[in-house]
Every structure is written in structure tokens, then in C-alpha cells.
Image (tube, grey):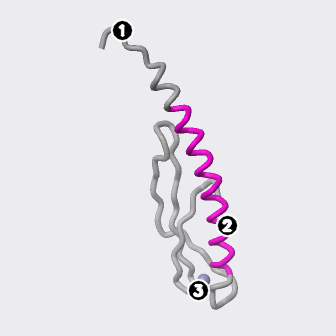
Amino acid sequence: MPGFTPRRYDSQTGGEILFNKKLKLRLIEAQYRIKELEERLCPCEQHDWIEIHKEFVTISNCDMEVLRTYKCKTCGKVTKKYDWE
Ligand SMILES: [Zn+2]
């Protein structure tokens, strides 16, 4: 496309990143709450997590996270955690 300037696209991307950061903070808060509840739910009082799966999740164009799946050896409960948690 001749004469095309990507300025508008850039500002949209910036807004998206900011949004993702806010979303990330909210997710962290939610995950902490879930974590607290899960700790209380194990019959042995403390979960014994082992990693059973690993996947890559694309958050935005230049941001990728590793999402790991853990399973408790004691009660069999499964949880998913990002590397930044
Ligand atoms: Zn457990």
C-alpha cells in the first residue's frame, strides 16, 4: 500500500500491551486467591505438585508465556500456573 504509515497501528499496539498488563495483575490477584483455597482443600494439608504438562500461550504479538500444568501427588488435583507466578 503506497503512502501507508503504521502510526495508528503502533498506538493500538501500545494500548493493547497496557491492557494486557492490567489483565495480568488481575490474574495474579485471582490466582493467589485460588491458590489459598486450594492449599486448604488438600486432604494432606499441603499439595505435592508435580509438573505433568507444559504449553506456550501467546499473550500478545511479542509476549509469550509458559503455562505449566501441575498435578498433586497426594489428592490428584490439577492446577495450571504461569512461569511469572
Ligand atoms: Zn493435594
Label 1 packing within 10 angstroms: few (<14), some (14-19), many (20+): few
The residue indicated by pointer 3 is 74
Q: Which amino acid does label 1 sit on?
A: Gly
Q: What residue type is labelled 2?
A: Tyr
The kind of secondary structure the magenta stretch mainly shows is: helix
Report whether the residue tagged 2 is closer than 8 Å to ligand 1. Answer: no
Tell me the SS state at disc 1. loop
Tell me the SS state at disc 3. loop
Identify the residue at image location x=51%, y=67%: 69
Residue 20: mark = none
Q: Position of residue 28 (x, y in %)?
A: 64, 58
The residue indicated by pointer 1 is 3
Identify the residue at image location x=63%, y=56%: 26
Q: Which of marks 3 and 2 is in front?
A: 2
Q: Position of residue 45 (x, y in %)?
A: 69, 87
Mark 3 touches mark 1? (CB < 8 Å): no
The residue nearer to you, when weighing 35 against 10, is 10
Please identify the residue farthest to the top as the structure is shown: 3
Tell me the SS state at disc 2. helix
